Image (cartoon, helix red, strand yellow):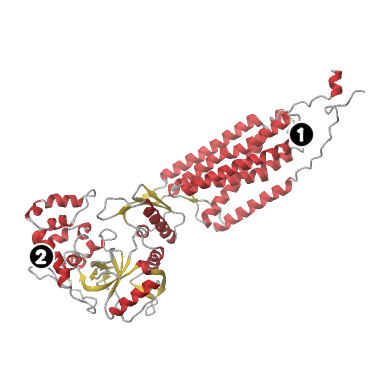
Amino acid sequence: MASVTGADRPRKKIQRKRLPVAPYFTALLLVLAILWVSALAGSGWKFPTPKLGLDLQGGLSMTLTAYQQGSDEPPSAETMEQARQIIESRVNSTGVAEPEVFVEGTENIVVNVAGDDIDEQALRDVGAPAELRFRIVTNSVADTSALEDALAEETPAEEPTDEGAETPTAESSEAPAEDASATPTDEATEEAPGSGQAAGTDDVSPTLDDVWAKVGPDAAAAAQALTAAPDESTLPLLEPFGELTPEEVSLLPAPVQFYVPQISCEQLDNRPPGAVQQPDIEVTACSAPESAAAEDPTLTFSYKYLLQPATVLGSDVTSADVGNDQANLNQFVVNVQFSAEGAEKWGALTTENLQSQVAIVLDNEVVSAPTIREVSTNSTQISGDFSADEANQLADQLNFGSLPTTFVVETVNEVTATLGVDQLEAGLLAMLFGLILVFLYCMVYYRLMGFLVLGSLLAATVVLYPTVALLGSQIGLTLTLAGIAGFVVAIGITADSFIVYFERIKEEMAGGRSSRSAVPRAWVRTRRTILSAAAVSMLSAIVLYILAIGPVRAFAFALGLSTLVDVMVVFLFTHPIAEWLTRGNLLNKPRLSGLHTKTAPATGDAAAKG
């Protein structure tokens, strides 16, 4: 009797439990319902639309350039990154969501803000150094040059107060006079045209010698000899100072800036950022313009202050918030809290200077100059003619800290959406063209299964759209051209998951299995590959998002989001649909499915008969 080999033994039929597809479809529908309801609620129950980026809807693009007076070395990379983070925090505090703030080159920071309601001045202010200094007022005088220009005649103005005013010491006035005797020579006068030209260019920064040469030796000597307002005979000699640029004015000694009436507050206010930043020197600064006539608010003047070195700095402030003046509830003030060390410094300053004016200087401007009425330590108030937005901006600047280096606004450009819209249309066409190509390929190669690919891509689209719109309304995610490129690239990644799955089904059916048996076996072997590929794609997107800047981060975010949606769609839609199709006989028909089957191997008896 012939022995029965393993090949001759009858195979046991393994009863595989059918996958219950209803829970998967229910879960997918539940996710869709949550996403769409949330997106509708976030858009005010209107059809949700994604928040478009600068390149798609237009906005403002500002370039800030680091300015280091007297140094040709660019700031370090650490300094620029610290400045970028502070500027980004300031932009976010203005209510602008998802701005693009990135370092360009070695000394530029680019701020891109999308939208058509952006306040350009508020955007410019985010690049201010926000250096706070508390300085005792040595002297003050009204600067009426603006009034004189408007009225074409001299208008007398009253000084704010004489309390605490002191005359400059002989030491402070003699030091610059010594420089004057050595500097303004005939040789320097001959070179003045060349020096003035250099000072007026962007490539060569002026020096103090250039400034003395530009105004001439007589004007330089007269200016440095001043310890009070000039008399009528001296005024004509000082006329050249009115022709100086703000950068040239910033190089002059503080008493010269203060006592020369031809040096206006307009010149002083437009000095380079950080012109009065150094705390241990005497400086001159102006207050914000005040109205000279109630009936004509356009007629304004400012006060010019000669200020002592600062002993209390912005770094001594721990927090700042906005409040209302107790005497005038319509007036906004900024309440400042000092650190332990700052409180000690502030207490010493108020103790030693009772009944004197203390100027609160922010960058190049005197915000306010109140008189010290009593000794205080832990806190103080900064008052001024603030609007609510200005007070909040000042508080934010103090809370976020000053910039580690100073910046000048190089350019502020209005970006129109025309080019972006054209590119968006091109990107959407590329996405549609890619979808069509993927669908046609799958229809030719997989036939019936191509409709499963199309359905899965549509399901991914229905999930992605409300997700992007919801993230735009909740966290300010903006859709940019780079993000659209990420979604286009994700089409190929999503199609890879389908191809891996379908090819495994083909291999199983080519080995003699029916679709009912091949699909679950292929899924068990394929899902690990799909998850591994998705993990690699997610890891790449995360690393790219962390390390990249600007538009590249939008690409990385879109790629990562698409990968997550791809995995969800494959698990909750593609595989359940494939399982559902095995309940019929469609997948077993090669002409319809493209999944070619192979005849099962013959048994031993059949082979013997053959």
Residue 196, above or below 576:
below
Q: Using residue 406 as the reference point, say whether residue 396 is left or right of it.
A: right
Identified at 54% across, 54% down, the residue is: 471
Q: Is residue 492 visible?
A: yes
Q: Is residue 48 visible?
A: no
* Secondary structure state at the residue bearing disc 1: loop
Question: Residue lying farthest right?
Answer: 1
- What is the distance, in whole Å, between disc 1 and disc 2 at their CAs? 105 Å
Tell me the amino acid under the disc marked 2: Ala
Q: Where is mark 1, residue-wise? A: 585
Crowding near the residue tagged with mark 2, few <14, some 14–19, many ≥20 C-alpha atoms within 10 Å: some
Q: Using residue 286 as the reference point, say whether residue 568 is left or right of it.
A: right
- Residue 201 versus residue 184: which sits nearer the camera? 184
Q: In the rendering, at what x and y percent does residue 224 appear?
A: 13, 65
Q: Where is mark 2, residue-wise? A: 222
Q: In the rendering, at what x and y percent does residue 609 appear?
A: 86, 18
Tell me the amino acid under the disc marked 1: Asn
